[in-house]
Image (cartoon, rainbow, N blue to C red):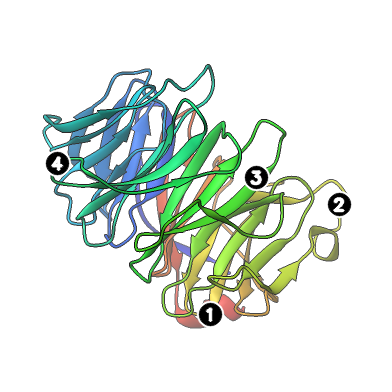
Amino acid sequence: MRPQLVAQTSLPPLWSLDRVPGASVWLAHTEDGELLVLDDALAVLSTVALPAEWKGGHAVAPDLSFVAASGPDRVAALDMTGHQIWSRPHADWQFEESGSCVATADARGVWAVVRTEDTDTCVLFDAKDGTVLRTAPLPARTIGSELLPHPDGVHVGIAAGHGDDAYRVFLVAADGTGPARELPGESRILIDIQPGSHLMLTTPYGEGPLALLRSPDGGLVAARRHDALFAEGDEVFDFYAGFLGADRVLAASSAGRHVVFSVPDLRPVAEVDYPDDAERTWLIVRYDGTWVTADPASGDVRLWQAADAGALDE
């Protein structure tokens, strides 16, 4: 499959780059602490400066009304000029640990993973004033996490990394009580949740399979092992993948290959044939059929799409 280059840009060296659920923008976090909201021409729409040591998972609301930031000892909501709306302290993350946050689909709430004296907890804050609306303790302490708002508007998915080199998947319901619900498996990274079907896509930590799980119970729908696809024994699935649309997944290998799979059976249907050999360390996939590749060291970012619908089956 030969993709079409839609846009490209050169940014400062990057700490992270993410899609924004529910919006046609991308969120870049530079090494020096700036949050950059990018449109689909990869032009900068907004810049919000954060302290350089704030290396947690940050987010912007789908309506671009505020930024939710995860700091070493607090969660904060900022307007798009960087002015603080509210801040809620929590116990300090330790060296090389961090929390994460994400805005809800209706921009009325902020989900965050925070450190408490007893454990790590997923908290839902009111986006207006930081009032705590829901708390859900996690069963194990984390070193890093990512939050994905569920398309049902009620749940949030948590991809949590732990000190025992395990990655676990949790779901929390805004209208529920009690702790976060852990889904089966200890080496899965929750990477995307599909609108409509609510299928959950996971990538492996290590040599496990690319997998589709049923929401909300976590039952296995399909799995694709690396050794059934890649000829080289040491080539495995990377962390990066996502739903490219209703019937396609795009996933990266550790060798930098990007492969398209059908949904729901995860049958390989195409490999992306890029027109150059530029560095593509990161792959971020969006449900509208576009994706970005990036080299965090140079800050080079490129936006791609399939040249035409039929190209996915070439």
Residue type of the residue flagged with mark 1: Asp
First of labels 2, 4 by sequence position: 4
* Disc 1 residue crowd, few under 14, some 14–19, many 20+, Cα 10 Å: few
Asked if disc 3 and disc 4 are in contact, CB closer than 8 Å, the reply is no
Q: Which residue is painted at 38% across and 18% down in the image?
A: 53
Residue type of the residue flagged with mark 3: Tyr
The residue pinned by badge 1 equals: 247
Secondary structure of the residue carrying numbered label 4: loop
First of labels 1, 4 by sequence position: 4
Q: Which residue is painted at 54% across and 21% down in the image?
A: 96
Disc on res. 129? 4
Secondary structure of the residue carrying numbered label 2: loop
First of labels 1, 2 by sequence position: 2
Q: Distance between the residues labelled 3 and 4?
A: 32 Å
Q: Which of marks 2 and 4 is in front?
A: 4
Q: Position of residue 229 (x, y in %)?
A: 80, 64
Q: Is residue 173 left or right of residue 46?
A: right
Q: Taking 255 as reference, is 263 above or below it?
A: below
Q: Position of residue 271 (x, y in %)?
A: 64, 65
Residue type of the residue flagged with mark 4: Asp
Does residue 155 show up?
Answer: yes
Q: Is residue 255 left or right of residue 227?
A: left
The residue pinned by badge 3 equals: 167
Does residue 257 show up?
Answer: no
Q: Where is residue 256 in the image (x, y as percent from the top left)?
A: 65, 48
Asked if disc 2 and disc 3 are in contact, CB closer than 8 Å, the reply is no
Q: How far apart are marks 2 and 4 (CA)?
A: 53 Å
First of labels 3, 4 by sequence position: 4
Q: Distance between the residues labelled 1 and 3?
A: 26 Å
First of labels 1, 3 by sequence position: 3
The residue pinned by badge 2 equals: 232
